[in-house]
Image (cartoon, grey):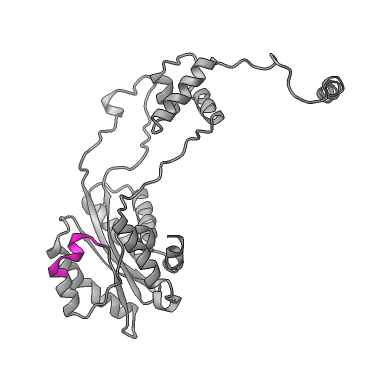
Amino acid sequence: MKTIGHWIQHWKQHGDVEDESGRGRKRKTTEEADHAIIAAAEQQPFTTPRILRAELELDDVSAKTVRRRLNEAGLYGRVSKHEYPYTPTHLRKRLSFAGGYGNWTEDQWDTVLWSDETSIELSPHGQVWVQRPIGEAFNPKYMRTQQLHSPGASLWGCMAASGMGEYHIYTDELDRFVMRDILSQHLLSSAARLFPPGSWWLQQDGDPAHTSGLVQQWLFTHGVQCIDWPPYSPDLNPIENVWNDIKRRVEKRNAKDIEQLKQHLAEEWEVTDPILLNRSERVADRAWVQQ
C-alpha cells in the first residue's frame, strides 16, 4: 500500500510514473566503457561478454553487466548459423531442383530412398563438465585434451517414408571402391524390402565417392534411377533428422572404445522411431518452397 501511495502521489506531482533522475542503482560502467564495449563487439562480433570484459580490462564489472550493455545496444548473444559457400552455379542448381521436383506428390516422394553418410567421434562433443576441487581448473588431471583427429566411426544408411533401410558401419576412408561395395551389399536389398512394387528413386549427394565413374557405372548396370541432387543441400534431405536423433542417443551411451561405439550405432539405428521417418520426409517435401 505504501508503494501504491507513493506512485499516486508521484503522478499527481509530475504527471508520469517515471523514476526521478539520480534515483536507483548507479551504473557500474561509464559512458566511455559502454562505447568501448559496443565498438569492440561491432568490430569483432564473434566474441562473448566474458572475452570482452577481459580484453577491455573491465575488472570492476561482471560479464553479466557487459551482456546487459550489449543488449541495450541491440547486440544479442546467439548461436551463429552456418553458411554454405554457395556460388551462382550452386544457387541455379538449387532453384532448378525446386522447379523440377516442386510438383511431385507425397506418393512420389514416398518412392525415394534417401541415403547419406555421417561420422561420430569417440570423444565427447560440446561442453564437457568435470567435477574438480576449487582452484584446480588448470590441473591437467581435470583438463580436457582436444584431439585434432579424434577416433570414431562412420555410418552409411538409407531410409524411406515406409521405414529404415540397411546400414553399413566403417572406419576406412570413403572412396569409390568402398562406396561401390556398400551399395552392392545394401542398396538393392533395402529397396526390395521398402518398395515392394519395385518403382523407386535413389537420393545421394555430390560427394566424389558417389559421383565417381565406378559408382555411376554400378548404378547404371543395376538400373538405379537417381534424383538430380543440388550441391550443399543437406537442408533438403530428411535423413539429416535421423542422423541428429541417432547421434544424440549414441552420445548418451558414452562408448568406451571404437568397437562399443560401432555397437551403439548399430543398435540405435535398429530402434529408430518410424514416426520420425515419415515426419522428416514430409518436412523435406516442402523444403524446396523456402528456397
- Residue 125 counted in the magenta span: no
Q: Is residue 280 visible?
A: no
Q: Nearer the viewer, residue 114 or 275?
A: 114
Asked if residue 103 lies left or right of residue 92, the reply is right
Q: Is residue 186 above or below residue 124?
A: below
Q: Which portion, as a residue range, is magenta?
A: 206-215
Q: In percent of the image, x 78 and y 26: which residue is there?
A: 17
Q: Quadrant of the N terminus?
A: top right
Q: Quadrant of the C terminus?
A: bottom left
Asked if residue 72 lies left or right of residue 230, the reply is right
Q: Quadrant of residue 9?
A: top right
Give the x, y percent position of residue 30: 54, 14
Q: Quadrant of residue 53?
A: top left
Q: Nearer the viewer, residue 41 or 256?
A: 41
Q: In percent of the image, x 24 and y 73: which residue is there?
A: 187
Give the x, y percent position of residue 145: 25, 33
Q: Is residue 10 above or below residue 179?
A: above
Q: In percent of the image, x 22 and y 38: which residue is there?
A: 147
Q: Is residue 223 above or below residue 38?
A: below
